[in-house]
């Protein structure tokens, strides 16, 4: 079993940046593709970004492409989400999770397990 803990959330003005971290314990993250999702109040959880086990492949939701970057450091058992040019509509709780299915389904929350507790990101206008 993998335990995931997100950190780095907070309050930032529009146009600002934040970096989220997702630290794992229990098992090595290099065994898994990883993903970031977010959920805003009253909305369903939505895919943000995914990364393959090696880190060579990444994929993004159209809404964040060009602004967000997912990366991983397998030696530190940590995955990151660098968020730049933040917009008020990026406000949400952000979750990381392990992909226990195929990277080709990286945007499908059903292939993910071991969800973290979430990190609040609030972007003010």
Image (tube, helix red, strand yellow):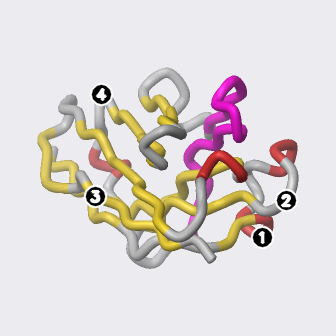
Give how far apart the Cα atoms at labels 2 and 1 are: 9 Å
Q: Position of residue 90 (x, y in %)?
A: 36, 49
Please tell me whether mark 2 or mark 4 is closer to you in this view.
2
The N terminus - image quarter:
bottom right
Residue at 28%, 47% in the rendered image: 88
Residue at 49%, 73% in the rendered image: 3
Q: Which mark is residue 101?
A: 2
Q: Which residue is mark 4?
A: 85
Q: Tell me which corner region of the image, top left, top right, bottom left or bottom right, holds residue 87.
A: top left
Q: Can I make out residue 44 in this image?
A: no
Give how far apart the Cα atoms at labels 4 and 3 are: 19 Å
Q: Which of the marked residues, 1 or 4, is nearer the chain's N terminus?
A: 4
Region rendered in magenta: 44-60
As helix, strand or loop, the secondary structure at mark 4 comes to loop
Query: Within 10 angstroms of label 2, few (less than 14), some, or many (20 or more) residues?
Result: some
Task: Please determine whether, in this image, residue 96 is positioned above or below residue 33.
Answer: below
Please tell me whether mark 4 or mark 3 is closer to you in this view.
3
- 6 part of magenta stretch: no
As helix, strand or loop, the secondary structure at mark 1 comes to helix
Q: Which mark is residue 7?
A: 3
Q: Which residue is mark 1?
A: 110
Residue contact at pointers 2 and 4, CB within 8 angstroms: no
Q: Position of residue 96 (x, y in %)?
A: 51, 59
Q: Which of the marked residues, 4 or 3, is nearer the chain's N terminus?
A: 3
Q: Position of residue 104 (x, y in %)?
A: 86, 43
Give how far apart the Cα atoms at labels 1 and 4 are: 29 Å
């Amino acid at each position: 079993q993998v335990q995931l803990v997100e950190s780095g959330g907070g309050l930032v003005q529009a146009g600002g940046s934040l970096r989220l971290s997702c630290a794992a314990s229990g098992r090595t993250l290099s065994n898994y593709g990883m993903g970031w999702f977010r959920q805003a109040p009253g909305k369903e959880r939505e895919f943000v970004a995914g990364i393959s086990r090696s880190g060579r492949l990444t994929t993004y939701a159209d809404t964040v492409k060009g602004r967000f970057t997912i990366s991983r450091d397998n030696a530190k058992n940590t995955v990151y989400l660098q968020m730049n040019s933040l917009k008020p509509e990026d406000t949400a709780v952000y979750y990381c999770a392990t992909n226990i299915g195929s990277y080709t389904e990286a945007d499908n929350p059903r292939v993910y397990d071991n969800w973290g507790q979430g990190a609040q990101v609030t972007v003010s206008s």
